Structures are given as C-alpha cells and as structure tokens.
Amino acid sequence: MFHNIVIFDLDGTTINSDHRHATLADGTLNLAAWKENCTPEKIFQDQVLPLGHLVSKIGKKAFTIICTARNMSDADFEFLMDNGICVDKIISRPHGNNEPDAELKKKQLNSFLSLKQFKHKNKIMFDDADSVRSTLRKIGITVIHPNKINERL
C-alpha cells in the first residue's frame, strides 16, 4: 500500500489550456466562456506540461488523483488517456455546480481523503491557483505551485 497521495490539478499545472481561457473584467475565470471552449476540437489542442509527463511515473510510487474544477467530458478523458496521464482517481466538477474552485476542491478532497484508508497518508498537491493552495493547506494538504517545477523540467 502506498504511503503518499499525490494530487494534480489539470489546467495550468499538468495541462496548458490557455488557448481556451477567458477572464472577466475583475480577472477571474469567465466560466461561461470556458464551457463554450470545451469542444473536443479545442480540448485536443491542449498541451501537456512537463509535470503532466511525470504523473504516471509518480503513480508507480504513490496513489495519484486528478482534482480539477473542469466538468470532465469524454474528450477530456480521451485526451488524458492519449497523453498517458493515468491516475487512480479523477475528481471533477459535477455538472450544474458553479461554486468557486477552492471550495469545490476542498469539499471533494475532504470527503474522499477522509476515507479510512487515506486518513494517515501524506497528501501533496500541485495546483496553480492561489485560492486553492491557501484553502487546501487549511485542511492539511501540502500544496505546491507547479510553475517552477514545470520550468525546471
């Protein structure tokens, strides 16, 4: 049994999907525009970042999870498989849910990681969002910004 749980965000962490990203005047994500840009054609234009290429290797030594605020579609799952990003568990935004990313991930990870088999494991996450990092650190997850890792790799 693995002693570590390693959690990966997708956008801006393991995958570059900037070509589909739109922001509102206040700098926050334009969720409506994001959803419009989630066509299979645009998803398959995403690029795997260096950290994304390590996910499967890390999975040989740890329990791996993708925790994303995306509404995952068949095209998203196909993109991950085509690019060798294979994990033990994928946690994503339920359809119809529009709550802020940090709160969504906190609820979902807290629920999953409170299962008996995960309670006493080291939990490390890679996420590029400041709000997610600060929120998840409060529930005992070590959260690392991926930018320097992606630059070095």
Image: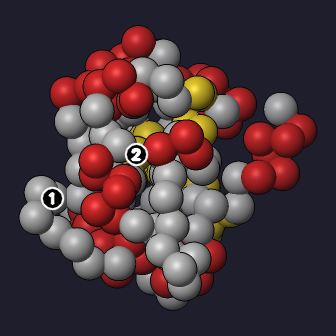
Q: Quadrant of residue 80?
A: top left
User: 37 or 97, which lies in front?
Assistant: 37
- Identify the amino acid type marked 2: Ile
Contact? badges 1 and 2 (CB < 8 Å) = no
Q: Residue at x 28, y 32 (%)?
A: 39
- Quadrant holding the C terminus: top right
In the image, is 64 to the left or to the right of 103?
right
Asked if residue 126 can be seen in this view, the reply is: yes
What x and y, as percent, mark residue 81?
37, 17
Q: Is residue 78 left or right of residue 16?
A: left
In this rendered view, identify the residue nearer to me: 105 or 2.
105
Residue 66, numbered label = 2
Disc 1 secondary structure class: loop
**CA separation, marks 1 and 2?**
14 Å
- Specify which label sits upstream in the sequence, 1 or 2: 2
What's the residue at 28%, 47% (across, down)? 36
Going by the image, does 143 lie left or right of 83? right
Asked if residue 110 shows in the view, the reply is no
Mark closer to the observer (1, 2):
1
Count of marks, rendered view: 2
Q: Residues within 10 Å of mark 2 (few under 14, many from 20)?
A: many
Q: Which residue is mark 1?
A: 94
Residue at the far right in the pictured view:
152
Q: Nearer the viewer, residue 68 or 136?
A: 68
Image coordinates for residue 64, horizontal then vertical, percent: 44, 41
Say above or below: 95 vs 152.
Answer: below
Where 33 sits versus 84, above or below? below
- For the N terminus, the quadrant is top left
